[in-house]
Amino acid sequence: MSAAAMKTPADRANAPKKPVYLDYQATTPMDPRVLEAMMPFFTEKFGNPHSRNHEYGWEAEEAVEIARRQVAELIGADEREIVFTSGATESNNLAIAGVAHFYKDQRDHIVTLATEHKCVLDTCRHLEQEGFKVTYLPVRQDGLVDLAELDKAITERTVLVSIMGANNEIGVIQPLAEIGAMCRAKGAFFHTDCAQAYGKIPLDVDAMKIDLMSISGHKIYGPKGIGALYVRRKPRVRLQALIHGGGQERGMRSGTLPTPLCVGLGRAAEIAKNEMATEAARLTKLRERFLSAIRERLPEVFLNGDHTHRLPGNLNLSFAYVEGEGLMMGIKDLCVSSGSACTSASLEPSYVLRALGVEEELAHTSLRIGFGRFTTEAEVDYAADRIIEAVSKLRSMSPLWEMAQEGIDIKSIQWAAH
Amino acid sequence: MAYSEKLVDHFENPRNVGALDKNDPAVGTGLVGAPACGDVMKLQIKVNAEGIIEDAKFKTFGCGSAIASSSLVTEWVKGKSVDEAATIKNTDIAKHLALPPVKIHCSVLAEDAIKAAIEDYRKKRV
């Protein structure tokens, strides 16, 4: 028996309170309804969905196909356009490298954004080494793509434009319909990494002229280890597979499908479809409640990324004169994420914030705060109080805050970079 | 990443936070680091007629390790002569706080801060 199972109710009541989870862009807990749907497929309904000869195979296959339809319905797609993968990283790799390799004799240029997720940028870097040309477009100060710049970047050699639906750090939502129309008019495929956007904001592959879309399970209260790639059938998008084998998923992704994970992703998509509107409204309210509490009681706090074109549950704030990692240590009972990557040896702040033109000293003071399905109003109020308290304390011991109060411009000082 | 108890204690209960009058001839001020690098330390010492550091104050912009390193050195320099204080090594700070490898630069910065404060004090004396 595990230690956790042996605890008495009294032990649990005396146990230290769990920290408040405000990092929903990193991952989400599974919705109990998702787990419930998955459970039978681990034990009694354990068949291989690709076994065509018996009952166990048939019931697993049926479950997988229901899940595929649920995943498709959330974005107005046909179930035959959904390929299950291990997650959004694999989907992004498959979409970008798969299209680039298949069409390499016709076109050899890819356009993406400087603020994309590392797995998109890294795949593009890899393709550059193979000889492909890649344009990494800068973004505007609000984090959004400049459509005029994008228009200039797409040429008759461009095979693929890869632009994310919503950013994982700053939550800004890109104008997908405008980008899709532009790509279609110029004959380039449009891939969008929607790991953060899928299930959070309305998406329609036809209205937005999306050709490929990456989807993640664990960002939408589903299981980790599963994702999907939407691949348009009309007009058809062809891919060269990354994983070879038994030819499952119409040859685009071999390997036995993990039935329970597929079922979980499907159920999570179904719940998201039914509850998206109410959940988005609730999260937007919580986010604004938090932001006004902070702004009322703390001066010099800056929101990174556009406010309106933003995921309902995301905030990215710079608390001037207080270093982000030190701040996180001061709010140990809150789980947030720091925009400053001081834990890495490089001391480089977030490349996303740098791409927005956020000055390095402010980039070092940023926190990403993510609200989600299980965040309560009481948690939001508690978090705001704790952050205000910690920022005030750390500012009182910050030499930069002291200088600012004395009217010294910290830019006028000759700092020795180290 | 788990930090040592000593480090957490210095972060949560920092010693000698504050400022001394930088125009006082007995006070030496060291300001090291850079906001763009995510670390700035200001360390001040007040030296008495016998050449002993009788007070030290700091303010730090930085991570928990940077704050703890500067808090620790203000404790260490107090009661030492200026020459003794100049011999404090970053490796001693890193060892005392059990700094993880990626945080060694915080102890380097703290050593630089003492040296800069001493240099400023000595400049005022000539």
Image (tube, rainbow, N blue to C red):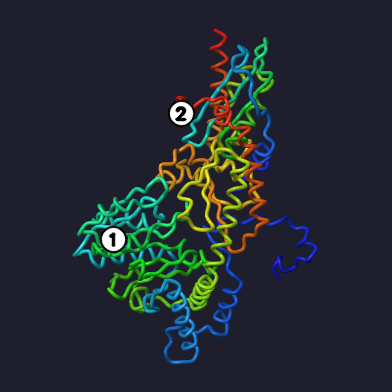
- Residue B108 vs residue A8: left or right? left
Q: Residues within 10 Å of mark 2 (few under 14, many from 20)?
A: few
Residue appearing at x 35%, y 76% in the figure: A245
Residue A417 picture location, percent across and down: 44, 31
- Looking at the image, which residue sits at the far bottom? A54
- Residue A227 vs residue B6: left or right? left
Nearer-the-camera pick, A15 or A34: A34
Mark 1: amino acid? Met
Contact flag, marks 1 and 2 (Cβ < 8 Å): no
Nearer-the-camera pick, A217 or A78: A78
In the rendered image, which quarter is residue A132 located in? bottom left
Can residue A96 be seen? yes
Can residue A169 be seen? no
Residue B37 picture location, percent across and down: 47, 36
- Say whether mark 2 and mark 1 are on the same chain: yes
Quick one: SS at disc 1? helix
Mark 2: amino acid? Lys
Residue A186 picture location, percent across and down: 23, 62
User: Mark 1 or mark 2: which is in front?
Assistant: 1
Task: Say which quadrant the N terminus of chain A sits in.
Answer: bottom right
Residue appearing at x 57%, y 74% in the figure: A34
Sooner in the amino-acid sequence: mark 1 or mark 2: 1
Check disc 1 and report the residue beneath it: A182
Q: CA distance from mark 1 to mark 2?
A: 42 Å
Nearer-the-camera pick, A327 or B113: A327
When the figure is inspected, residue A15 is found, relative to residue B114, above or below; the finding is: below
Check disc 2 and report the residue beneath it: A411
Residue appearing at x 53%, y 31% in the figure: B40
When the figure is inspected, residue A407 is found, relative to residue A366, above or below; the finding is: above
Quick one: SS at disc 2? helix
Which of the chains bears the disc numbered 1? A
